[in-house]
């Protein structure tokens, strides 16, 4: 059951994701899909095509026909749900990807009726698979579709006004699947670009494909310094982006502020880890800023519920409903950022106008799957009557863990939905206060751990 996570299914190839388990997943999933067709794509890992065959066997046995898009980024997989393929619109899609995880991992991101399949539905699917007997195989029923080129054509058409812009663009695909579509889009838009690690390679020989980790950006930073005006980097399945200038590594919440500049009174959804500066600045500009749970599935659901224009995670998941379909797409986000540059917006100058704050990166507190939610419950209990030395609490937001608002900033404690850790983050207008909040909240977490 450990492979069934809050947002997706994820495990180690052969050990946890093997013919038996993956065929069962396909068969059980087929019963959740009303329509006849499911579109399926996969990332660059060597075992992704093998898992594709196992999954197809299960989906076919469950009565579904498969539209095979082959090797594509996750956003291309999502894109197929909004297109007709020889008179057929898929009722669901499955992306076989380990995202930014090490090469031995793989998994499934599932969309049904244009909505993420996650949370309690995935856990229920897991229980069903665990209880399942032998599956009777049927004849293979797969139709190939050219999703990659349909997507490339779409992006080129949507951003044809960028053709020939003068800025020098450098980028790092991290040997993930961004390299399947990005170079051709750049070429057709006649942009001046230089790319690193473009060829998909599921062993990720150059660096780990996670652009939220500073170390993984070292090579593209060197290239930017020498040859570029702006840089982009992508995770393994191209649904997360990093944007770099000569002065800034622009995190997802600050990207949202920049993107929202070209939208009239937008509704913007952020996660609990986003800077207070983002929420305050959006509100000051007349936008409706909404704080919600972390997780790409959660944000997509919330966006649809309140008809939001934009959503973001600090890690670089950016979701556009404004002029797009409402899912996280790092390729699309690239060209929306280039639009801002073409329109004369100086990204560094806009960021320099914002109130200065001192923020930590995500800090992970190791624990166990069994303990993490118990610790969170105890932290919430202790916050009802904190120690006398604890900083003054203005209020507590408990939409996802606890975000404690203090006089000059905030601290966050939440249980990760994907790993056995608590995630903390701290921010203040004063470095000393940020450090104080971190020290005091960590002491509270330790007290909670010791009490269990």
Image: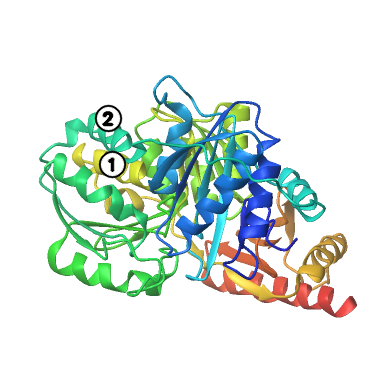
Image position of 412 with respect to 343: above or below:
below
Q: Secondary structure at mark 1?
A: helix
Q: Secondary structure at mark 2?
A: helix
CA separation in Å, label 1 and label 2: 9 Å
Label 2 environment density (alpha carbons within 10 Å; few <14, some 14–19, many ≥20):
some
368 vs 304, left or right, is: right
The quadrant the N terminus occupies is: bottom right
Q: Position of residue 77 (x, y in %)?
A: 45, 41
Q: Quadrant of residue 243?
A: bottom left
Residue lying at the far top of the rendered structure: 87
The quadrant the C terminus occupies is: bottom right
Mark 2, residue position: 158
Mark 1, residue position: 335
Q: Quadrant of residue 406?
A: bottom right
Q: Which mark is residue 369?
A: none
Image position of 309 with respect to 388: above or below:
above
Tags 1 and 2 touching, CB below 8 Å: yes
Q: Position of residue 434 (x, y in %)?
A: 58, 69
């Amino acid at each position: 059951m450990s492979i069934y996570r809050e947002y997706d299914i994820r495990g180690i190839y052969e050990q946890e994701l093997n013919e038996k388990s993956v065929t069962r997943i396909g068969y059980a999933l087929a019963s959740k899909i009303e329509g006849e067709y499911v579109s399926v794509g996969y990332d660059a890992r060597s075992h992704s095509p093998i898992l594709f065959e196992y999954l197809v066997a299960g989906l076919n046995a469950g009565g579904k026909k498969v539209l095979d898009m082959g090797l594509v980024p996750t956003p291309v997989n999502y894109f197929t749900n909004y297109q007709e393929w020889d008179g057929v619109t898929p009722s669901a899609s499955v992306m076989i990807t380990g995202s930014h995880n090490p090469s031995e991992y793989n998994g499934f991101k599932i969309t049904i009726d244009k909505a993420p399949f996650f949370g309690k539905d995935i856990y229920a699917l897991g229980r069903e698979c665990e209880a399942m007997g032998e599956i009777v195989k049927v004849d293979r029923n797969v139709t190939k579709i050219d999703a990659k080129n349909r997507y490339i054509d779409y992006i080129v058409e949507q951003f044809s006004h960028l053709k020939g812009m003068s800025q020098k663009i450098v980028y790092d695909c991290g040997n993930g699947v961004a390299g399947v579509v990005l170079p051709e889009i750049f070429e057709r838009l006649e942009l001046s670009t230089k790319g690193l690690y473009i060829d998909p390679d599921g062993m990720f020989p150059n660096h780990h494909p996670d652009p939220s980790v500073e170390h993984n950006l070292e090579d593209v930073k060197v290239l930017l310094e020498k040859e570029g005006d702006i840089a982009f980097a992508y995770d393994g399945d191209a649904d997360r982006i990093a944007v770099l200038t000569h002065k800034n590594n622009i995190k997802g919440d600050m990207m949202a502020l920049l993107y929202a500049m070209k939208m009239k009174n937008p509704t913007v959804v952020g996660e609990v880890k986003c800077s207070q500066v983002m929420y305050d600045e959006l509100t000051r500009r007349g936008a409706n800023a909404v704080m919600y749970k972390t997780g790409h599935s959660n944000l997509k659901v919330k966006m649809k519920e309140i008809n939001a224009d934009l959503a973001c995670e600090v890690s670089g998941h950016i979701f556009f409903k404004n002029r797009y379909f409402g899912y996280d797409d790092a390729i699309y986000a690239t060209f929306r950022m280039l639009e801002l540059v073409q329109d004369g917006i100086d990204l560094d100058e806009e960021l320099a106008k914002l109130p200065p704050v001192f923020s930590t990166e995500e800090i992970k507190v190791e624990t166990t799957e069994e303990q993490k939610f118990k610790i969170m419950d105890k932290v919430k209990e202790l916050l009802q009557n904190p120690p006398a030395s604890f900083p003054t609490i203005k209020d507590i937001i408990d939409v996802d863990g606890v975000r404690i608002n203090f006089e000059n900033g905030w601290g966050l404690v939440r249980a990760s939905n994907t790993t056995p850790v608590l995630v903390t983050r701290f921010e203040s207008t004063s470095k000393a206060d940020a450090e104080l909040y971190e020290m005091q909240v960590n002491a509270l977490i330790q007290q909670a751990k010791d009490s269990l």
